[in-house]
Amino acid sequence: QVQLVESGGGLVQAGGSLRLSCAASGRTFSSYVMGWFRQAPGKEREFVGFISRSATNTYYADSVKGRFTISRDNAKNEVYLQMNNLEPEDTAIYYCAAGWGGYYAADYNSWGQGTQVTVSS
C-alpha cells in the first residue's frame, strides 16, 4: 500500500477555483491508478474522477466534467485536482485514493485522510 496526504482545501466563493494536491509515499506510485472521491455531510462517498498510471487517460463524473481536471507528476509522487467554477454543491471532504482504477471506492485500497472544500454562495 501507499500512504497518501491531501492538501489545498479551503473556503472559496462560488465561481472560484482551488487546486488540491495529494502526496504519496513509496517508490511504486506510478504503478497505481489515482482517484479522487468526495463526501458531503449526510451523503455517501462519491466518485469524482481518476487518472491512469501514465497520465494518458482521465475519467470524470458528469457532475464535474468540464470544471475539474486531474493531473499527476510521477517524478514527484503527486496527483492534483484542479477545480474551477466551483459550486456550493461541490462542498465536501475530498479524498485521493490509490488502486487499480474504476468508478467505485472498492476499486482503491489506499486512502488519504481527506481535505475539506467549502464553497459559499
Image: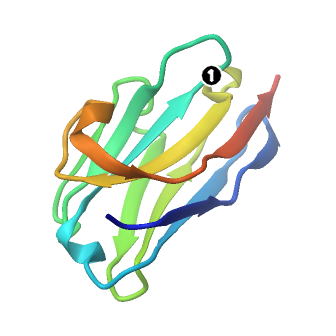
Q: Residues within 10 Å of mark 1 (few under 14, many from 20)?
A: some
Q: Residue at x 23, y 75 (%)?
A: 30
| Left or right of 18 in this view: 69 | left
Q: Nearer the viewer, residue 18 or 37?
A: 37
Residue 103 % position (x, y): 24, 32
- The three-letter code of the residue at mark 1 reads Ala
Residue 40 % position (x, y): 62, 22
**Which colouring convention does the figure follow?**
rainbow
Q: Nearer the viewer, residue 97 or 63?
A: 97
Image quarter of the C terminus: top right
Is the residue 68 above or below the residue 30 in the image?
above
- Location of residue 16 by image quarter: top right
- Location of residue 59 by image quarter: top left
Total tally of numbered discs in the picture: 1
Residue 112 % position (x, y): 52, 53
Q: Nearer the viewer, residue 22 or 113?
A: 113
Q: Find the residue positioned furthest to the front.
A: 1
Residue 65 seen in this snapshot: no
Q: Residue at x 34, y 41 (%)?
A: 49
Residue 3 % position (x, y): 46, 66
Q: Residue at x 69, y 59 (%)?
A: 8
Residue 97 seen in this snapshot: yes
Label 1 SS: loop
Q: Residue at x 19, y 39 (%)?
A: 102
Q: Label 1 belongs to which residue?
A: 40
